[in-house]
Image (cartoon, rainbow, N blue to C red):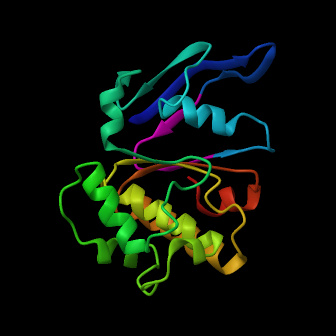
Amino acid sequence: MEYILQTDHLSKVYGTKTVLDHVSIHVPKKSIYGLVGKNGAGKTTLMRIICGLTRQSEGSYILRGKSDDPAVRNNMGMLIEKPGIYEHMTALENLRYFSMLFGIPSQDHHKILEMVGLQNAGKKKARQFSLGMKQRLGIADVLMKDPQVIIMDEPTLGIDPEGMRELLGLIHRLAKEDKRTILISSHQLHQIQQICD
């Protein structure tokens, strides 16, 4: 089996508090891999290490065949904690701005918004969006880079049941139809059981 991510005894200590304690996982390519645990279990910390947002205290990891190489993150999308969107802009304006900011080649932003269910957001500013709409816009931002690896931390947090079902369906399609690898975290076991391999 081919693995997109392997961690070997990853640990993170802040002062005297151990927040991640020798975690070893193997994430198969083109799968949905779930991390489940209560708040404070270390899920976000593990994802932040893999995304290069913080350094581990011990252990190592291999991402896309390379050990701690920032270049492998060029084809990775991440949605950690809450989406970084500009609330004074519309969904379309946000995508156009991020395309320009990060030098992402021109693409069909309308199609990406349709993929995440925001095709009818129109001229509504992001500050008027529900939490679920903001999460979808965050995922749209992630998809603009056409990443083969997507890391999402609690993407359904605070979303109503219908929005949650739609979002989980989108995550499933991204992995199964688009052949992407997705690492997702939740403290809700039933969500993880619904979509993870």
Residue for point 77% across, 19% down: 18
Decide: is 62 above or below 99: above
- Front-most of 72 and 141? 141
Type of secondary structure dominating the magenta stretch:
strand
For the point 71% across and 17% down, which residue is it? Answer: 13
Q: Is residue 1 visible?
A: no
- Residue 176: quarter of image: bottom left
Horizontal and vertical percent for residue 167?
56, 70
Asked whether 171 or 143 is in front, the reply is 143
- Viewer-closest of 119 and 61: 119
Residue 148 percent across, percent down from the top left:
34, 48
Q: Is residue 138 magenta?
A: no
Position of residue 5 in the picture relative to residue 196 (left or right): left
Residue 56 in sight = yes
Residue drawn 40% across the image and 43% down it: 29
Magenta-drawn segment: 25-34
* Location of residue 88 with respect to 100 vertically, above or below: below
Which image quadrant is residue 62 in?
A: top left
